[in-house]
Amino acid sequence: MGAAALVVSAAPAHAAPAAPRTTAVGGDTATPALVDGIREQAPAARTAADAARGYLAAREDRYRITDPGRDLAPAGTLTSGGRQTVRLRQTYHGVPVLGGQYIVRMERRDGRRIVTGTSGKYFTGLRTGTTAEVDDALAVERAVDAVRQDLTARSFDAGTDGEADTPLTGTSHGLVVVPNGTGVLTRHITVRGTDPAHGEPVLREVYIDARAGYPVLQYSGIRTFGAPAGTAARGSAAHTTADDPAPGPAGSGVRLDGTTVPLGITRDDTRDTFVLRDRTRIRANPDNALATWDARGRWVSDLSGAWPEDLKEFASPTPEFTGEATDSGAVDAHWAAAQVYDYYQGTFGRDSLDGHGMTVNSLVGVTEYGQPYVNAFWDGGKMVYGSGDAEYRPLSAALDVVGHEMTHGVIQHSADLVYAGQSGAMNEAIADYFGNAIEAGVRRLPMDDPDSGLLGETLCRTKDPRACAFRDLNDGRTTAGSFLGIGFGTDNGGVHLNSTIFAGALWDIREDLGPDLADAVVYKALTEYLTPLDGFTQGRDAVVAAAKQLKVGGKKLTAVQRAFTAHGIVPHWEKALGIDSDVLLSRVNTLDSHLGAGGGWWAASNSNESGSEPYSVWAGRTDGKGQLKLMSPNDGRYHVNPATDGKTVVWQAHGADGVDILARPLAGGPVRTLWHGRSVGTALGVDGDTVAFAYYNYGGRPGVAYLSLKDPSNVVTIGGGTYHRSTFPSVHDGKVVYQDRQRVRAVYESTTRLIDVATGEQKVIQRSDPQSSLGPTALTGDHVYWLLDSVDENGTTTLRRAGLDGSGVTDLSPESGPGALDIADLTVSADAVTVVARTPSSEISNAALAKLWQFTPDRTGDGTRRSRVSCNRGEQLSAAADGATRVLWLDATTGVSEVVTRARPSGTCA
């Protein structure tokens, strides 16, 4: 989303006003993304926001904003000395526009306001209607269903036990226009709960098409610090005790490294103790404070976006905090929060994270279902720090971690970079930059210290700093050599995986310009130039423009530009990313839709190039010859998850009144409705006369259904109940295989089953441990294939095969041992099995992403040979097998999804 930034050279401050040089911005907007080097008077007005809007209205010929007073709402003004930076949030016919924000920078002199520059995104191409056909209740239901299905796909067993269901709840924030092309009217829903497979908190921002009820955008709202290498409200009210105690004497505490540090504390007469509440710093509101809370024994899933009623601040009978306050990381968290506050206040005059004196709350000692939690996050209103484990100390023990998380709060209250894709990676990069900058200053680390770019390197008990670090800003990563194309379902589109590309450029600038000037440049870019949907290229433009505004010129300005170029952040850098596969369909602008293939044909869902239209189903030949065929009607519904056997295409059509399963012959003919229901899973298949699919009843109870194309009214359903649930169907040659879980005499039984459609006869292929998780299935004329996660939860998966009678059970890819894979999905032909899998590693690398692996008989015929299908660097998803070893998939290497194919595997990738 969003247009490319506009690069404008700055004019000298004393120059006469001149029209800035501009270039085309792109198809989404005619409004320039960056105008600098101007000195133009704004109309007289009572407020800075009114002056900014009046200026834009008077310059409609340049900015193409027809009615700024109507379509731009004030979103905050930053005042620093004689400068004012006004942020204006775009609305379209009264509806907020996601990421639509425009900035006007002004100086106040002699009672006048002089505009010195503008930047941001105002989308002039919006044409969508603003009347919703889906109400809040239905949008919440669809959003919760979408998140539940995503969790199910990731863990196989989410929602398969009746008594173990974990509720997800949704909250509507009203209508929002997603600015894809002419715009998509959506309802913004926040879904909260717990991932039942991992215990991780769930906080998803979901945007539901307000006409069809389909999710068009989904990403996590939790800003985590990330994983160590080798292994929501805006603002926050002050949480206090019933009485309002006055500040007490200065306190002290012992950090986990053994040093004694001063602490701001308060005497709490109601508890006859001293508490970690520092009310000496925040100036805008004396009732607000830096407060550190005892969250030991709390589960991380209970704290994201929520505040437990009985939470208490850490307390001590004396002003000295030691013992549990030290061991839990509370002393470190409280001391570090003060260091971060003082940095932003002392360096930039910023009063707390929002610039207006908000309370800063830190929760320490959090666990994951009682087990160690080695992470930290900002949830939009507070910091939450994990307990650590046998190797890693509590996460608050590292000043750069605390600085990182608190900087997420600063970002939220300034540029508010959307936490997904490139804007999310810049969000992480800026948090890393300032977290490290603050720690380097306190520890007096020189910029040429080889460890100066490490984050979290002081957390380990036994590892050396480099082995301990979560990330390294000196890792040398570039867009050309390191950028990982990823969908939003993985790391929110690479917010951590790609962050050091941008952060590395910023850290290089700090080495070249020196800490003070570099910090000023990056802060100015963050608070006065960047807007929510900016990507790497716009980030470069913002930093360069901020440097010019601070009078950086000559060799130093060249160093700023050189730093970005060295990391590959240059205009149109995405076009340099290549692939080793054949593209069948480019720019696939869809969310959570799978491919289908068979009989020499493929089928995929797609929108228009900008992603503003509801999805349609297209079909084509797998060899790339001939013309594409439009299979679905353009009726305003979202047509997704197609499957084909080379004769018929079947797919799902999502609308406001539910979901239909539709079918149409490839040879032509009318579209037929086979089934209608409230919700379906992604599993859908067709072979000859038989169609099989997964569905959901209310409450997310999964079931399996199959029917005949000749008589679709005779639908056979299995599961879908509280204590009998069925998942992951596949169909071939008149047979359906699926996973079944039901309670039999108070004990759950998990089985892989095969049904002969003609006779209704069922065969149990294998019974599994009730604690194991049974995953996707596949079927050929000779074998049943399925995935299995054992009770060990070791992060890897078994790929298992058996004959149609249940004999000859073989593990093609065992769950343990060398080469074990974390497999998410599979697809088969008569000659090969292809899986979508990750190698078990938490390293930030190409290999850690989902890739395709293919298993074929070896030359002896007694074993199997494993090969990589493609060496493309980006994420590879939604594999669909055709004949022999040909497979198709969705590839994200180039930064956009494409349907690609290879006739044979690449083999071994470097």
Image (cartoon, rainbow, N blue to C red):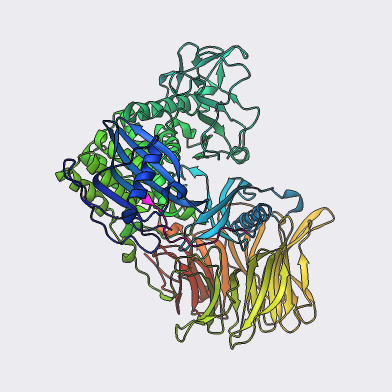
Residue positioned most to the right: 745
Along the line of sight, the residue nearer the viewer: 347 or 623? 347
Q: Quadrant of the C terminus?
A: bottom left
Residue 757 x/y as whole percent: 75, 79
Q: Quadrant of residue 441?
A: top left
Asked if 166 appears above or below 877 in the picture, the reply is above
Helix, strand or loop for the magenta stretch, by majority: loop
Q: Residue furthest left?
A: 554
User: In the rendering, at what x and y percent does residue 486 appear?
Assistant: 45, 59
Front-lying residue, 826 or 265: 265
Between 533 and 221, the one lying in front of the other is 533
Height in image: 262 above or below 880? above
Foreground pick, 128 / 272: 128
Locate residue 106 relative to residue 605 in the image: left or right. left
The residue located at (25%, 52%) in the rendering is 8
Q: Position of residue 462 (x, y in %)?
A: 43, 36
Q: Residue at x 73, y 49 (%)?
A: 164
Q: Is 89 covered by the magenta stretch?
A: no
**Magenta span of residues:** 120-132
Where's the N terminus, which quadrant? Answer: bottom left
Residue 322 seen by the camera: yes
Left or right of 551 on screen, residue 464:
right
Residue 372 placement (x, y as % from top left): 56, 38
Q: Quadrant of residue 701?
A: bottom right
Left or right of residue 54: residue 151: right
Q: Would you say 412 lies left or right of 702 here?
A: left
Is residue 121 highlighted in magenta?
A: yes
Q: How many marks?
A: 0
Using the rendered image of the protein, determine whether residue 500 is visible from the camera's viewpoint.
no
